[in-house]
Image: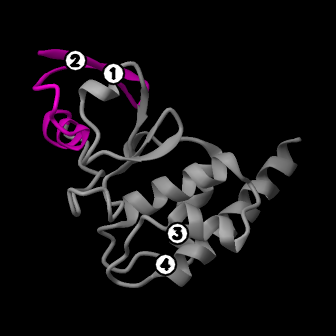
């Protein structure tokens, strides 16, 4: 069956089974490979994208349930908060192996788009479903804090 999806602001028609996970549509049918497969159980966060602005695991979300939603993958992140997160990640050398980082960036960006000044508890709650096998959690938290300051400073400069 054909499904019409809006991904990164563009319409895509995909002819797949309705119960196919969105992850496989994004990766295998649209070649947007920044979103990773990790566990297949929505436990690790590697497959995180934004669905209507909310960090969502795509390994358990069906393509049929994705129709009519605004889907953003790591390739489509363009918000000022996303740019601040990516800049902080580079400055602090957050990734080690990097496999989980697209999911980490997606979750961090979703947090900052909703809360521009998160507390440690806010960060812990928002990032709790993202596993980093390399254990870069302190750098991830520092990156989110740096991105929040950078975004605040950039927003203040443009006001």
Q: Earlier in the sequence, mark 2 or mark 3?
A: 2
Badge 2 vs badge 1, beta-carbon distance below 8 Å: yes
For this rendering, which residue is in front, 90 or 126?
126
Looking at the image, residue 36 lies above or below residue 131: above
Residue denoted by label 2: 3
Please report the residue visible at 53 percent of the width from the left and 74 percent of the height from the top.
140
Give the mark nearer the N terminus: 2 vs 1. Answer: 2
> How much space separates mark 3 and mark 1, taking CA atoms?
32 Å
**First reached walking from the N terminus: tag 3 or tag 1:** 1
Alpha carbon separation for disc pair 2 and 1: 7 Å
How much space separates mark 4 and mark 3, taking CA atoms? 6 Å
**Residue 131 placement (x, y as % from top left):** 37, 72
Q: CA distance from mark 1 to mark 4?
A: 36 Å
Q: Earlier in the sequence, mark 4 or mark 2?
A: 2
User: In the rendered image, which quarter contains the N terminus?
Assistant: top left
Residue located beneath label 1 in the image: 67
Indicate which label's residue lies in the foreground, 3 or 1. Answer: 1
Q: Quadrant of residue 146?
A: bottom right
Q: What residue range appears in magenta? A: 1-30
Q: How is the image coloured?
A: one colour
Q: Which mark is residue 89?
A: 3
Mark 2, other Cα within 10 Å: few <14 / some 14–19 / many ≥20: some
Tell me the quadrant of the picture where the C terminus can be found.
Answer: top right
Q: Residues within 10 Å of mark 3 (few under 14, many from 20)?
A: many
Residue 50 at x, y percent in the picture? 45, 41
Q: Along the horizontal axis of the image, is 124 left or right of 48?
A: right
Q: Earlier in the sequence, mark 1 or mark 4?
A: 1
Q: Using the image, determine if residue 48 lies above or below residue 29.
A: below
Q: What SS does tag 2 mark?
A: strand
Q: CA distance from mark 2 to mark 3?
A: 35 Å
Q: Which mark is residue 93?
A: 4
């Amino acid at each position: 069956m054909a499904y019409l999806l809006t991904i990164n602001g563009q319409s895509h028609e995909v002819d797949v089974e309705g119960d196919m996970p969105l992850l496989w549509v994004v990766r295998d049918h649209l070649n947007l490979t920044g979103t990773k497969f990790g566990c297949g159980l929505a436990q690790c966060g590697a497959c995180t994208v934004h669905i209507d602005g909310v960090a969502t695991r795509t390994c358990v979300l069906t393509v049929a349930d994705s129709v009519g939603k605004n889907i953003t993958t790591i390739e489509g992140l363009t918000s000022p908060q996303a740019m601040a997160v990516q800049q902080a990640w580079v400055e602090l050398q957050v990734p080690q192996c990097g496999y989980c980082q697209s999911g980490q960036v997606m979750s961090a960006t979703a947090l900052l788009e909703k809360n521009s000044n998160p507390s440690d508890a806010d960060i812990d709650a928002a990032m709790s479903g993202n596993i980093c096998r390399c254990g870069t959690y302190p750098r991830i938290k520092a990156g989110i804090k740096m991105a929040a300051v950078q975004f605040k400073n950039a927003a203040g400069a443009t006001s």
